[in-house]
Image (spheres, rainbow, N blue to C red):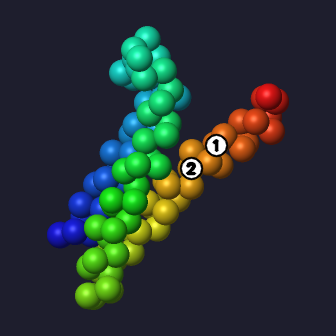
Amino acid sequence: MLGKVSIGIAFILVLIIINEFVQIVPTHKTKLEGALILSPLLVAPVGLILGLIPLKKSRDNFAKWGVITNIILFLFPTLYMIVATLIGGV
């Protein structure tokens, strides 16, 4: 159960990141103005912990993929800022 919740958290974070680029739901005209790109830094550790609990008890594939995706999502904002600085400059 917790492995599926971990994947669900990762899926929601991916949808939020995609929305920042595609703007299906316009958020740039609100006070957020791109701050949602940093949301994985706050939410991904929760999904990581929820994925590690069943991974310690039994080798659940959902938990394994939940941990992997949440680690990648946790690193995404930092990598995005580095790549954007290298491409776009200051």
Q: Which residue is mark 2?
A: 76
Indicate the position of residue 89 as horizontal and vertical percent values.
Answer: 82, 30
**Amino acid tagged 1:** Tyr
Neighbourhood count class around disc 1 (C-alpha, 10 Å): few under 14, some 14–19, many 20 upward: few
- Disc sitting over residue 88 in the figure: none
From this view, report whether residue 27 is shown above or below residue 7. Answer: above
Quarter of the rendering occupied by the N terminus:
bottom left
From this view, report whether residue 11 is shown above or below residue 89. Answer: below
Indicate the position of residue 76 as horizontal and vertical percent values.
Answer: 56, 50
Q: Which residue is mark 1?
A: 80
Secondary structure beneath dot 2 equals helix
Indicate the position of residue 88 as horizontal and vertical percent values.
Answer: 78, 29
Q: Is residue 83 left or right of residue 3?
A: right
Residue positioned most to the top: 29
**Amino acid tagged 2:** Phe
Is residue 21 something one can see in this rendering?
yes
Q: Residue at x 26, y 79 (%)?
A: 54
The residues bearing labels 1 and 2 have C-alpha atoms spaced at a distance of: 6 Å
Q: Residue at x 49, y 53 (%)?
A: 73
From this view, report whether residue 13 is shown above or below residue 66. Answer: above
Q: Are marks 1 and 2 in contact (CB under 8 Å)?
A: yes
